[in-house]
Amino acid sequence: MKTRTLLVAIAFLFMGTATQAQFFKKLGKSAEKAAERAVTRKTEQKVNKETERAMDTILGNGKKNKKRSSKKTKNKELEENDSPVNSKNKRENADETATDSTPKTWSKYNFVPGDKIIFEDDLSGEENGEFPSRWDLSQGSAENAKKGNENIINFENRSIITPLMETESYLPEVFTIEFDAYFEDVYYSWQSYNIRFWHGANHHSEGKDFFYPIEVFKDGATTHTKVQGNAKKYDGHNETIGKSTGWKHIAISFNKRSLKVFVDEYRALNIPNYKYKPQMFSIGSYMHKPEGKTMAIKNIRIAEGGKKLYDRVMADGKFVTRGILFDVNKASLKPSSMGVINQVAKMMQEHTDLKFSIEGHTDSDGEESHNLQLSEKRAAAVKEALTNSGVEAARLKVKGMGESVPVSDNSTPEGKANNRRVEFVNF
């Protein structure tokens, strides 16, 4: 370790004192520490590669470093993955780059999505290479593609897209936004997905007030506001979250004035008074040196919020959630489901008189008998997760309802999403 540190220091010194001084002077004092970390990391990588090359030559392994694939090669790989043979293989094997294929506890995750889906796009039925049919383009370029067995929206650098909605002011007073974003193994600030609550400009202004994009990184998020002349920066990063790459779940909640942003289970931003009422939103992409790398999103959902879980139980004798999600055609819970499950467990621990029948519901896709069995298995998976969180099994029972009790039309993506739900009925 000491030897490698010495090599890094020597390599950096080779830049020359004048070059270093000029470099950091341009960046400014606020960026010195970040730049130093980036330079050190890049230098370490270069030293390691040179050392490995030298060792291969000495040992006669004849290994050669593979060149980074070009953008053209990358697109070709995405298309090839869409072949029937590859699709079958990928269904049997999880995407090797995805991080959420590994079970996670998410024990402190407290994001609860809205209870009515107003926009849902899993990109099913889309044609590769075409612009996604349920979106509009504000800037740059984006297209449908495949990554493993997943449908994705593949971004060009600095592109911005916004959902196609019937009205311009479609975000309600209380709402949540969720999507999965792909992060490459690059320095944390070199790749971001930018959320804008307006028409896709770099920032929105109301008089003299400014609200800048929410920049979401692999380890957290940041944003800026300037209201009545007072500038504020909101910034949250977590080194542990930043160590993993691949797919990350991004969740945003807005409640009349408060704004929260989650990256996987980490709550990166918690702004109690955002002082702006969002009406529209867009998603943009950014990456430093993007050649041969992936910038993509999938599983986008907007939901309208509602009352707290306990208030719903007291008013209706039950509550319905669409925030407990499963892998396609399986009963395995997605990690992001733990936000709701953690809240249910907490509520049942605080109110020991509560007992629930967990009822699973599906949309109408597939055979009715299969959906009935699947819904019961999913309800059982929720019960298991709750008992693992400390709830007594005797206070829970399960029931599969399949597609028999739809609450929305199964002809639209939003209707299907609203039918795929878990109901907790007090007994």
Image (spheres, rainbow, N blue to C red):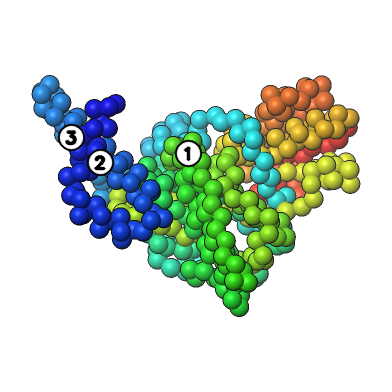
As drawn, the label of residue 43 is: 2
Instruction: Using the image as rendered, state which of residue 314 and residue 150 is in the foreground.
Output: 314
Q: Which of marks 1 and 3 precedes in the sequence?
A: 3
* Distance between the alpha carbons at the discs numbered 1 and 2: 20 Å
Q: Secondary structure at mark 3?
A: helix
Mark 1 surroundings: few (<14), some (14-19) or many (≥20) residues within 10 A: few
Sequence-wise first label, 1 or 2: 2
The quadrant of the picture occupied by the C terminus is top right
Q: Which residue bears the numbered disc 3?
A: 50
Task: Give the farthest residue toward the bottom.
Answer: 207
Q: Which mark is residue 239?
A: 1
Does dot 1 land on a helix, a strand or a loop? Answer: helix
The answer to which quarter of the image holds residue 385 is top right
Whether residues under marks 3 and 1 lie with C-beta atoms below 8 angstroms apart, the answer is no
Which label is found at residue 383?
none
Please state which of the two labelled residues, at mark 3 or mark 2, is closer to the viewer: 2
Q: Name the residue type under label 1.
A: Glu
What distance separates the C-alpha of mark 3 from that of mark 1? 28 Å
What residue sits 49% from the left and 36% below the top? 240
Closer to the chain start, of discs 3 and 2, is 2
Q: Amino acid at mark 2?
A: Thr
What is the secondary structure assignment of the residue under circle 2?
A: helix
Q: Amino acid at mark 3?
A: Glu
Please say if 163 is above or below 153: below
Confirm whether residue 267 shows in the render: yes
Residue 161 drawn above or below residue 416: below
Image quadrant of residue 118?
bottom right
Residue 150 coordinates in the image, percent (x, y): 46, 44
Which one is in front, 264 or 131? 264
| Closer to the camera in the image, 151 or 196 | 196
Residue 1 % position (x, y): 29, 26
